[in-house]
Structure formats: C-alpha cells, structure tokens
Image: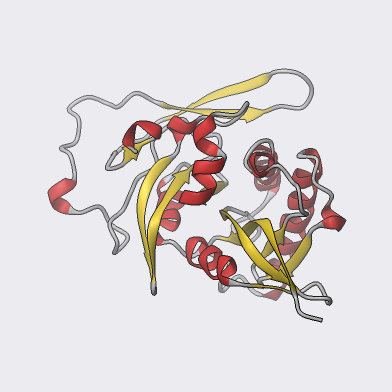
Amino acid sequence: MEPRLEHRALLAVDIAHSAARGNVALHRIRDVLRQSLREALEESGIDWDACLRDDLGDGFRITAPAGVRKRRLIHPLLPELAVRLRAHNRMAGPLTSIRVRVALHAGDVCLGQDGQVTGRPLEVLARMLDARQARAALDAAPDTVTASLLVSQHFYDETVRHGYPGIEPETFDRIALAEKEYTADAWLHLPGYAGAAQAPGRDGTAPDDEAPPLPETAPAPGKMINRASGNGVVYATQNGTQNIHLTRGPRGQ
C-alpha cells in the first residue's frame, strides 16, 4: 500500500548548545524537554499520544494529528513550554539549563503504515531549525528567554497574521532565511520577550553598514512576561540594547 498524503502541522524543537555536556547531562535535559513539551502540548489541547514523534538526538520533531488548529502550536504551547523551562532553569546548573529553538511549518507529508513521516515539508522544517538568525537571536536575548520561534511564511500567513487570541503579529519579525539550498522568508519571535529580536546577517552578525549608532542614554528596559501559578501575571524588567534591522509584523508585507 502506498503511503497516504495528508496536510499536517509540524513542530521541531532543538536544545541550544547541547554539545559537550556529557551523556549524563544530555539525558537529563532531554528528559526535561520531553516532559515539558508533552505538558505544553496537553495544555494546548493536543494529545501527545496522538502525535507522531521523532527523536532528533538533542530535540524532537512532532507531526500534529490531523485537524489540529495550527494556532494552538503557538499559543498556548510556546508560553507553556517557555515557562516550564524557566522553572527548570532556576534550579539547574550550567550543564543542565535548557534553552531551545523551535520551528513551525505545515504541508503535505507522506504517512507510512509504520508511522514514519517523509516529504519536502520536513526538509524545510530542518532548515528552519538550523537557521543562524534564530540561534543568534536566542544567544543575544536575556537568559530568562528560554526559546526562540521561527515560523514559515506559509504558517505565518495562515495563522500568525490573523492575530488570534494570544498571538500578536507585531512581535514577529521577518527574516531572509538561507540554509543550504533552501531560501525563503520566515518569521522570528521570542516568546515572552517584549524587546526586539536582534536580526543578524547571513554570517550570524549584524552588517556594519546597517548597524545604528549606540544611544547616548540607556535604552528603555525590555519587559519580560512570566506566567505564575494560580491567577495573575508576573512582570519583570530586563535591560538590554535593542538593535532592530527587521521588517516588523504585517505592515512589512
């Protein structure tokens, strides 16, 4: 029997700077990420057991069940995942702290009888997960930012730009993605961070001829938004220079 073709939402998560931590630490952070991701999916109304899951070594790839609302893979999933990783990091040491890069895409994939998923959308997802802009933005963000999110143009057009509850299109920044043979626009977001994501050039650094002069006075503090247990929201401030080299939100289309 030939594999069946279905349109599915795809999510991939990769632990940043996971190399050289050793097997004990790697197994620990993988377990934490797996549990945090499972809980975040369930909080989003997505059945973990109904997802097709692939182990990426230092992360996971999730093929969502048919019919899942793609917006739920952004909200509440990303805030739920980020807050769990922050809670873990408060008690973790350097070897077991976790920050992740997340990529979201959707497309027609081939589903085999053994649960194997193949197709071009998975290649696109892999290139997005490796995007140097997402790596650089997460490295430049405060330590309390535990995730960067990159969504494809297709996912953005179908989900983000509509401004569903919990999704603010103006907090997504368009980047020019060029990874191996894949080139396309994508949209970068730092969940829970009100500051602008720094957009590096293709070599991972901001071009000199585009860098604005440093302000003479201290910049306004960025605002971190953390979910607390029980009712309410905890606000904290985080100082940091914001260098903006991006087309912002729907206005840039």
Q: How many marks?
A: 0
Percent across and percent down for residue 61 are: 67, 63
What percent of the width, then of the height, locates residue 166? 61, 28
Quarter of the C terminus within the rendering: top left
Q: Nearer the viewer, residue 128 or 219?
A: 128
Which residue of the protein is positioned furthest toward the left in this rendering?
A: 209
**Quick check: can you spot residue 115?**
yes
Is 146 placed above or below 218 here? below
Applied colour scheme? secondary structure
Residue 31 against residue 40 in the figure, above or below: below
Visible in this render: residue 152? Answer: no
Q: Is residue 36 left or right of residue 247?
A: right
Q: Quadrant of residue 80?
A: top right
- Quadrant housing residue 27: bottom right
- Residue located at (60% from left, 59% from top): 107
Q: Position of residue 39 (x, y in %)?
A: 80, 46
Front residue of 40 and 25: 40
Most extreme residue toward the right is 49
* Image coords of residue 129 (percent x, y): 52, 62
Question: Is 70 on the left-hand or right-hand side of 114?
Answer: left
Residue drawn at x 85%, y 56% as measured from the top left: 50
| Residue displayed at 66% across by 71% down | 56
At a point 87% along the width and 57% down the height, the residue shown is 49
